[in-house]
Amino acid sequence: MAQEPVGESAPAGSNSLAEVRHMESALLVVFKSRVIDVTDRERAIIQDVLKADPKPTGRYRWVYSQMAQKLNKYIRKYKSLYAAKTLSDADYVIYFNVVEFRRILYSYYPYGELFVIVKGSPETLKSPRVIWRTKKMSVAEDAIGDLIKDLKILRGES
């Protein structure tokens, strides 16, 4: 019987978009995280994202526009999601952490990790948490494509 590779297993319920099945507003955030604390990396990333300005600057604006185009295409087709303008309007945050820009055949490609972060709720005593992330570092367009594919499966959209 084949065994699962070490480091590939995840606790039950992790990396699941089930919590956002009925949530309709998402905020897209793109920047390079300055996380140094590797002991609780997700908590540090959540704190960075919650304090970040949702408007991208510099070359992150280009990455943001690439990802937003794919999300907007999904939004127009299925109408099960809309873009939030501020963090307070959003049910959850889609965050792309730009790790590096790679140059391949005279073009630059942003590589990084994509996270889906559900905002906390003081009423239910739930803190903000990462509920989904890309399986590996990838190009921004591929990462958002993977998220959209998982959202379609979750919501029964084809």
Image (spheres, helix red, strand yellow):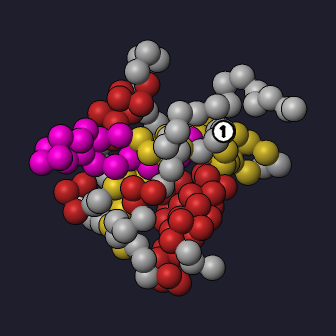
Residue ID at (37%, 68%)? 22
* Count of numbered labels shown in the rendering: 1
At which x and y percent is residue 77?
Answer: 53, 84
Q: Amino acid at mark 1?
A: Lys
Residue ID at (22%, 63%)? 89
At which x and y percent is residue 91?
Answer: 29, 59
Residue ID at (78%, 49%)? 106
At which x and y percent is residue 156?
Answer: 56, 75
User: Is residue 128 magenta-colored?
Assistant: yes
In this rendering, is residue 151 above or below 16? below
In this rendering, is residue 58 above or below 41? below
Image quarter (top left, top right, bottom left or bottom right) of the C terminus: bottom right
**Label 1: few (<14), some or many (≥20) within 10 Å?**
few
| Residue 51 seen by the camera | no
Res 84 quadrant in image: bottom left
Residue at numbered disc 1:
136
Kind of element beneath mark 1? loop
Residue extending furthest toward the left: 123
- Say left or right for 8 vs 14: right
- Say left or right for 108 vs 47: right
In this rendered view, identify the residue nearer to me: 33 or 5.
Answer: 5
In this rendered view, identify the residue nearer to me: 39 or 7.
Answer: 7
Image quarter (top left, top right, bottom left or bottom right) of the N terminus: top right
The magenta segment is 113-129
At which x and y percent is residue 70?
Answer: 56, 69
Residue extending furthest toward the front: 1
